[in-house]
Amino acid sequence: MRFLIVILSLLFTGFYSGHAHAYNHADAHALFIVDADTESIMDEEKENQDQDIETITIEDESQWRGANYQIIAREQFINNAQTLADVLQSINGIQITQISGLGNPVSVSIRGSSSKQVQLYIDGQLINDSQFGGFDLNQIPVEQIQSIEISKDQAIGTGATPIGGVIRINTYNANKNLLRFSAALGSFGQQELNLMVNTTFEDGSLAVGYNHLSSDNDYDYWVKQTYLDSKVSKYEPLTNNQFNKNSFFVNGQWTLSQHQFRLNYQASKQTKHLPNYQNNSPLNISSLTSDNQRVAFSHLWLNNDGWLEQLETQLYQDVKDEEYLGSVDGTRPTIGHYDSNQRTLLLRGLISHQQWAFSPFLNIEQQTFSSKTTFNGQTNSCNSLGACDIEATRRQITWGNRAEFEHKSEPFSAYVLFSQLLHHSENIALNQPDAQRISNNDSYWTGEIGANYWWSDIQWQANWSRGLRTATMFELFGDRGAFKGNQALAPEQSQSWSLAADYQATQWNIKGAIYRKQLQNSIVAIFNSANVGGYRNVSNALLLGAELSITYQVSKDLTLDFNADFIDSNTTSIFKAFNNKRLPGIYHQQYSAAISYKMSEQLSLKFVSEISNDLFFNMTNKVELNQGVYGSGAPSDRQLSKLNINWRHASYRVSVGINNLFDQKYKDLANRPAQGRSLQIKFSIEEQ
């Protein structure tokens, strides 16, 4: 608790430095429908002289923007970020850890959560995978993103309250003619190509884009047992670690009288080769190929008369086909086909009465998953040793209401969000004569309460939330004979409290937050003596955290930033190995400092340095002795530095980025040595 007291004193000392702050109630007002999937339809006014159309705009979202909720605009990342992970890792309170290079799984943690506990939305649609619970941050190229919203505790707008916050991606939609081209080259064979065309017409706009991204990922790796001589350990360029992806998207929006329509389509295909980390075999040809298509349609009806101001309908479908090729020695291949299909219907309204606004909603979602595995061309029977193909379905109905109150004469606003979740999942094993269909039905509720108040120069926010993560179909039912499911799993739950303050003056911006999060029923994989695994609810955890962010504008050309993030965690469990431990997968201390300097109208640079401490890789807080760097029980620490140089002239821009500037070696999320220094050069041209 001592560090919390120190941070509190830092937060609230100097807030009353005498800077006058004139509260403008109209500027602080944000539309009650604050969902950014609607925002990207309505965020820019379109003049229409021929029709009397009510134009809907979001007025800066300043009502809830602060330490708990942030928006990242396109201009902040479009010219220097390689992936979405690059953008998110600059946000205080968010931790990004990746396994061995571009295209591999990325773990996202918000305030100590696991990646499964974070909700990822694209254009208002939740895309977390029902089979495994995660999501792919590589799914959306940064060139196709208009803005990114981050909520560190509560839901954004309507929906079920998450345990680990929300990341919402709003894809590109503009109200101007635009032609943009960019190309990038980087270390380890990285190549990127982007093309985007946006055309406006009388009642709408159409954007079309293409992205190609590839990398050899052949950085030097410490191989314990080399292929030619298992007794020799040395650094070698990592083989069979290539990544290749092509993506195409179309975004269209148009207005007809009181109706606004939006259509989004994205198709992508990517292949990630899977290295053999043990001996780096040159014969290894293992890979995972994914073919994904996503389409979303939304209709917003604006009513000029009556108590119902607007009604929104969304239809969404996401289809993913994956093929796994497992062949570490070039022979005896294992081939797996995995098909996923998600369909969603969302209905949401806006009802206003005096100082109140109500947003009732209904969301119906169905996801299906199936697998088919062959070994040497033969389908194996499902048994305790071989792969067990499955067919699984999950259906969820979520309904509820968000009520918001805004005082007419005082700088105060508040909201309450309640949602009820009806959950049904079922699974059946294939290639098993006596297989029986297993089903699971449950009902849960989540809720939030928040208040917002401006006092002097400070915006205060207080929140309470009850979050939930239901067990995935893999955790409930398994999909391999050596990994059994558990129908009796209870959902992971949390209760969170947070207090945040945002102080703004002429040259200063200071944001701070303290929070307390109680986690219950953590779902963890446990293996028995026969090395057969299964999931169980094994522990609870208490997290106490504090965040501090300081920005100082030294001059119009020089800006200094400092971020600090502290987490104190402790687990309790009936299992001795998991009791009184620190939560795995997160850094418990993070510090970063940045300097941004505009050298001229054409040239600017930014240098960022980050120190991260106290990462544990498992629930027992123990790691293996690995290359003499970390001993048993020792956490992994990390120091990263990044330099960005940007040059701009007219419509042309060139950016140079150097990651891990001082080539500091550290361990990735899988406790493997991560890549060292990398360089990226990006050229772009944008014509309007």
Image (cartoon, rainbow, N blue to C red):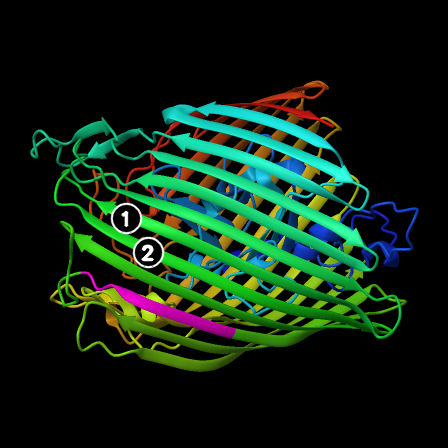
Label 1 to label 2: alpha-carbon separation: 8 Å
Quick one: label 2, few (<14), some, or many (20+) residues within 10 Å?
A: some
651 w.r.t. 145: above or below: above
Residue 1 rendering spot, x and y as whole percentages = 50, 62
| 450 relative position to 635: left or right | right
Residue named by callout 1: 324
Can the viewer see residue 75?
yes
Q: Does the magenta stretch include residue 391?
A: yes
Q: Nearer the viewer, residue 225 or 286?
A: 286
| Label 1 or label 2, whichever comes before in sequence order | 1
Residues drawn in magenta: 387-396
24, 248: nearer the viewer = 248
Residue under circle 2?
Answer: 338
Left or right: 452, with 678 as reference point: right
Say which amino acid is labelled 2. Tyr
- The answer to whether residue 353 is above or below residue 228 is below
At which x and y percent is residue 622? 25, 55
Place residue 270 in its image quadrant.
top left
